[in-house]
Image: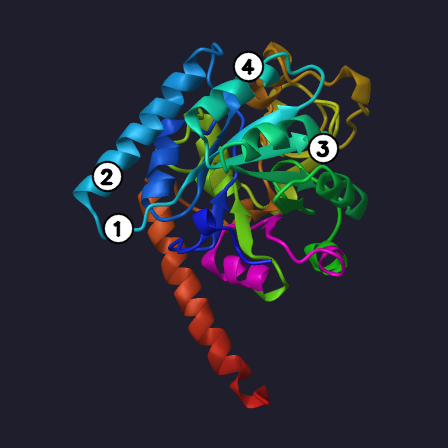
Amino acid sequence: MSIPAVLQNLRLPVIASPMFIASNPKLVIEQCKAGIVGSFPALNARPQAALSDWLTQIETELAAHKAAHPDAIVGPYAVNQIVHKSNDRLEADVRTCVDHRVPLIITSLRAPNEIVGAVHSYGGLVFHDVISVRHAQKALEGGVDGLILVCAGAGGHAGTLSPFALVGEIRRFYQGPIVLSGSIATGDAVLGAQAMGADFAYIGTRWLATEEANVSEGYRQAIVESAAGDIVYTNLFTGVHGNYLKKSIVAAGLDPEHLPDSDPSAMNFGGSAAAKAWRDIWGAGQGVGLINDAPPAAVVAERLVREYDAARARLAAATAPYAR
């Protein structure tokens, strides 16, 4: 299966992952202007009526940028939908996205069977987050157009499998678009994702440490100061296992070494409970140790391009003796 037309000709094979609270129109616009896919969770736009305003802002500013820079590579944008019974906005948010003909819908948690038809009705794509082969198969049965493999070390909700294992196993039965997530914070890692069989890299944590991200200065600085050993994997805060910054857990008065398990049935993505988890308990991936500054998103994007190009050249030289 070839890469869908809307995702061809990107400047870099990168989809910026949607980050709860942190992703906003300003960040998405800068990501798209840099030639990658920008994204945000629909739930970030509050109240629900604000979602249409956000989409209009993104579409208007990207159209103006294209008109002013006709030769520029501008990436499409994506909206994340949480497919869970507690998300009482899901139907309205999907309807809004259909009205705006959002190019790419990223779905999380339950297989998005009831969403796929609506998105396909206007030619949109649905990519689904998975952490296992079983989840991937269920999503494909529902008709999704691509899989996002959320592997060990990814920020926020994440699985535990090595990307080498999960990409390899899924490639045995699926040749469509694969996006790889997990500790990807540099252009070198983007190339590595492609080398192991993925089509795109999914980058989240690196964008938290940018000027445009809607995070507190404390959060931004914690990303810059932390390393992989400062990431805690727990299901306590939302009912789903995820990776969080140890510093924020300590600040909340908890012992990161002795956190209790949560009841998965208590998951709530429709109201303030989830928002509090992400606002006070800061999600981040194991790639934090590769982040040491918080510049504008455009600077991060340019750096990723340079690193990617340098990695390609370095790899070509390193593999030349083994050419057949």
Q: Quadrant of the C terminus?
A: bottom right
- Asked whether disc 3 touches disc 4, contact meaning CB atoms under 8 Å apart, the reply is no
Q: CA distance from mark 2 to mark 4?
A: 29 Å
Residue 95 at what x, y percent from top left? 52, 19
> Which residue is painted at 72% across and 42% down in the image?
159
- Asked whether disc 3 touches disc 2, contact meaning CB atoms under 8 Å apart, the reply is no
Residue 310, relative to residue 84: is it above or below? below
What mark, if any, has residue 102 been given in the picture?
A: none
Tag in front: 2 or 4: 4
Front position in the image: 274 or 120: 120
Q: CA distance from mark 4 to mark 1?
A: 34 Å
> Which residue is painted at 40% across and 66% down in the image?
309
What mark, if any, has residue 111 been given in the picture?
A: 3
Q: Earlier in the sequence, mark 3 or mark 1?
A: 1
Q: Which quarter of the picture shows residue 210?
A: top left
Q: CA distance from mark 3 to mark 1?
A: 36 Å
- Asked whether disc 2 touches disc 1, contact meaning CB atoms under 8 Å apart, the reply is yes
Q: CA distance from mark 3 to mark 2?
A: 35 Å
Amino acid under disc 2: His
Q: Earlier in the sequence, mark 2 or mark 1?
A: 2
- In the image, taking residue 199 as reference, residue 37 lies left or right, namely left
Q: Quadrant of the N terminus?
A: bottom right
Identify the residue under disc 4. Answer: 92
**From which residue to which does the magenta span run?**
170-194
Query: Residue 37: in sight, yes or no?
Result: yes
Identify the residue under disc 2. Answer: 65
Q: Earlier in the sequence, mark 4 or mark 1?
A: 1
Confirm whether the magenta stretch covers residue 197: no
Residue 233 at what x, y percent from top left? 71, 36
- Asked whether disc 4 touches disc 1, contact meaning CB atoms under 8 Å apart, the reply is no
The crowd level at tag 3 (other Cα within 10 Å; few <14, some 14-19, many 20+) is: many
